[in-house]
Image (spheres, grey):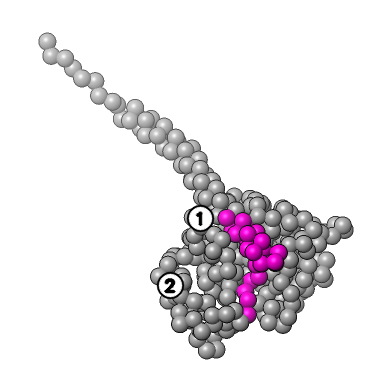
Amino acid sequence: MRQSRQAFTLIELLVVIAIIAILAAILFPVFAQAKLAAKKTAALSGAKQIALGSHLYAGDADDKFVPCAIYNQPGINNPGAKEESGECFYHLEPFDSMLEPYMKSAELWSVPADSHPLEDPWTTDACLWDGKYKGKFIRRSFEMISHIDTVEAGGWLDRNTGVTPSWWDITGGFPIRTMTEFSDPSNTIAFAEIWPLNGQAGRVGAVSDPIVFGCNAWKFAGRVPFSGAPGDRLPSGGDNCDDITRISGFDPTPGYMGKANYSMADGSAKNLGWGQVRGNDFYKFKIQKPTQTFAP
């Protein structure tokens, strides 16, 4: 007797396909979140290495925290230096170069979630200190904290914020901070993970755009641009913070579901949201913590 084979009906096939599609719709976002969480963990490890590097630097530099850049460093005639007239602040060694001996790898400045193209900075940036990063495809995903605008300071550059003076302050004689100045170093942010969508970030080995200052707080992950609508309004000062955030294309760092990694002044690292770094008038960026509470 001939055995007959029973095939799937069209309805049964469609039901199976529908079930697979539903499972895929459920699982794909979970996989994406797991992948993003892995990238966040890798970046947090990098933030920790940067924080430790700056802490070790202070131990070898008479308790001085690493500055944004040092003016007229020895070695300015290094044959590898790329100094093109009219474009750069001359003879300034950036902080990533000073921290290099204390960090495992220069690639720690770049995080996996940063989608900016990897490029050889030597071919794209004229303002490089020397040739140590030549041929290395590195992007800078972390920036150092300098003076930022706060309500407490009346909307202007608050010199109580930021672990480093800007490079033009160094040339003007403003002192480099010492570790004893921090009233709460474990609660003071030194470096922020920043990779805004419009590419407003500097390159490793360069003194161009290496710091957060003035209105640059718009770059922090999770920020809701004001733009004349409900959102977070930055302090209005000489840099017209709100006007800057209205400019098309000025988007915050995407981050990890509204959070980013931050290196602290005591050598630790934390994953923080916009509300935590913005709270109490950028409290976590202030060197001497105020007893008064300031509304954003």
Which residue has dot 2 on it? 134
Report helix, strand or loop for mark 2. loop
Instruction: Check if residue 290 falls in the magenta segment.
Output: no
Closer to us: 199 or 131: 131
- Quadrant of the rendered structure where residue 15 is? top left
The residue drawn where x is 65% and y is 52% is 268
Residue 221 in view (yes/no): no
Which quadrant of the rendered structure holds the C terminus? bottom right
Residue 210 horizontal/vertical position (percent): 59, 70
Task: Describe residue 122's horizontal placement relative to residue 86 as left or right.
Answer: left
**Mark 2–mark 1 distance (CA, rounded to whole Å):** 23 Å
Closer to us: 263 or 58: 58
The residue drawn where x is 45% and y is 79% is 80
Closer to us: 212 or 13: 212
Residue 204 horizontal/vertical position (percent): 52, 69
Report helix, strand or loop for mark 1. loop
Up/down of 5 relative to 223, above or below = above
**Highlighted magenta segment, given as a residue range:** 49-71
Instruction: Check if residue 50 falls in the magenta segment.
Output: yes
Task: Describe residue 132's horizontal placement relative to residue 177 as left or right.
Answer: left
The residue drawn where x is 58% and y is 51% is 44
Which residue has dot 1 on it? 113
> Please, what is the three-letter code of the amino acid marked with disc 2?
Lys
Q: Residues within 10 Å of mark 1 (few under 14, many from 20)?
A: some
The residue drawn where x is 34% and y is 27% is 12
Task: Describe residue 222's horizontal placement relative to residue 238 as left or right.
Answer: left
Which quadrant of the rendered structure holds the N terminus? top left
